[in-house]
Amino acid sequence: MEEFYTVIFAVLTAVSGILELVKRGESKIIKQADFKRFQNNYLAVYCLMMAGDWLQGPYVYALYQHYGFSRGDIGRLFIAGFGSSLLFGTLVGSLADKHGRKAAALTYCATYIASCLTKHWNDYNTLMLGRLLGGISTSLLWSAFESWLVSEHLSRGFDSEWLGNTFSKAMYLGNGLIAIVCGLAANFLVETIGAGFVSPFDASSLVLLAGAALIWSTWPENYGDGRDQAGLFQQLRSAMWLIGADRRIALLGAMQGLYEGTMYTFIFLWTPALSPNDEHIPHGLVFASFMVACMAGSALSGILMCHGLRPEKYMQAVFLVASVSLAVPLCVHSYSRSVNGGHVRGGMSLEARTQMVAFCVFEATIGLFWPSLMKMRSQYVPEEKLSTVINCFRMPVNAFVCVILFNISHMNIDTVFAMCSFFLAVCAVLQWRLHRFLASELFLPRTVASKMRPESGAKACQGRAAAGDRVLLGESLHGQPPTHDAFARRPSAATQD
């Protein structure tokens, strides 16, 4: 009965392995020993941080069920996590820029360990506190580590183009391979040796402690530009002004919000889509297939960037493929209802198999999306404000997911998929607009450039002599993408000129 899912997993594993071998061959051009040591250190930390997150994932819902809470109670716990990230995420991002990204990374470990400890109590209020801490931790996970990496990478004088290689590897390992290993480890603890539903959370705490020790002993501290500002809210206003003033950053934020909101919605939809009548499906094998598909997409992004292809261009096609992939379950459910009198088949039916293939394609686009987005963010968002800006991007995401979770029981699944497919199509349009905007900026008068230059960049370029009457802001269609360094070099990069 499970042969189809086994074949899908085997095919995806083979494709992912081949793509990773090709990517490694392409990335051998980066031979600088200092960079390799720096990259390996970051990847080790990132994998430990992601392991702490992935160990918890398979048994959060199961633990709440084990404690006897209703579906409504569990839903409110999940909403609290996203709501916490919505309310506190932007603040902790600003604090990371102001007080240090290393300190923020250690805070992530502390808050997530505290969240894990709350799972030992069968008390709703205590578990709610754990979800609130988990929401804060998630905001730190998706901002502090990336901000530390970008700042430290540039301050050490490494080629900015090498960031794409690190992002691709981090996605492949931390959100692919580590996810599969942690899923198996959590299953071993609970199902094989019977250590109980809390054991994955205890294992997560140990992994996070190890990661915290590695951060403490090997990472230097770095900061954004918030240390010299009057207050936290002034720093937030500065980041919001930056998003509004720079169309590239605003477009990136809109794309991230729409795509990430769709991704989180998909997490709650794939099980009822494949099993609408509670048919048996091999959840573990399906999850592993999704993660391998994500690894394949991540490896492909590394290959594309190694060949000099810009995310600004190929991500248009990625968004369109993602939109079509989530239009498939919309068509399947709508057609099945019209033909079968409202009955949708799942399990091993043709409808379920068709959706499974489409879902794997969508997961592959996730693997492409994250390293590509991180690469674009490192180019267009000044690293001094990166943590704050990233968490500003996440505000609409968390609000959207809270609304969906609150209303999902009242919505048809095909309606939600239609909405997700539409959002992804909008992402493709926004990516096209970004590409056109960059192409139109090929050459602009210096007076226009000065108006568009971020404040931090303007300070960095004071005293630098200008050559010529025009400044290169954009790129040729076959050249390298513009960065905020194209407006003005940061001091750390200027030393390499």
Image (tube, rainbow, N blue to C red):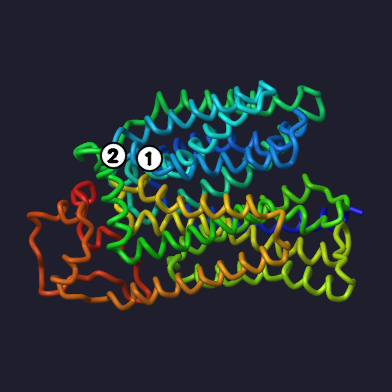
Q: Is residue 358 above or below residue 240?
A: below
* For marks 2 and 1 on the same chain, the one whose residue lies earlier in the sequence: 1
Residue 256 visible, this orientation:
yes
Depicted 400 relative to depicted 225: above or below: below
- Residue drawn at point x = 41 percent, y = 40 percent: 144
SS of the residue under disc 2: helix
Residue that mark 1 sits on: 91
Q: What amino acid does circle 1 point to?
A: Leu
Check disc 2 and report the residue beneath it.
232
Q: Amino acid at mark 2?
A: Leu
Q: Position of residue 266 (x, y in %)?
A: 65, 56
Q: Nearer the viewer, residue 301 or 27?
A: 301
Residue 230, how many percent across, how many down?
20, 38
Q: Position of residue 178 (x, y in %)?
A: 62, 40
Q: Using residue 216 as the reference point, say whether residue 6 is left or right of it.
A: right
In the rendered image, the quadrant that contains the C terminus is bottom left
**Image marks 2 and 1: residues in contact by CB distance under 8 Å:** yes
| Horizontal and vertical percent position of residue 199 | 70, 24
Q: Residues within 10 Å of mark 2 (few under 14, many from 20)?
A: some
Q: Is residue 13 visible?
A: no
Residue depicted at x 69% and y 38%: 73
Tell me if residue 380 comes above or below residue 37 in the rendering: below
Query: Which secondary structure, mark 1?
Result: helix
Crowd around label 1: few <14 · some 14–19 · many ≥20 (10 Å): many
Task: Say left or right for 165 vs 382.
Answer: right
- Residue at 34%, 74% in the rendered image: 437
User: Which mark is on residue 459?
Assistant: none
Seen from the viewer's position, the closer of residues 82 and 31 is 82
Label tally? 2
Q: Horizontally, is 137 left or right of 101 in the view?
A: right
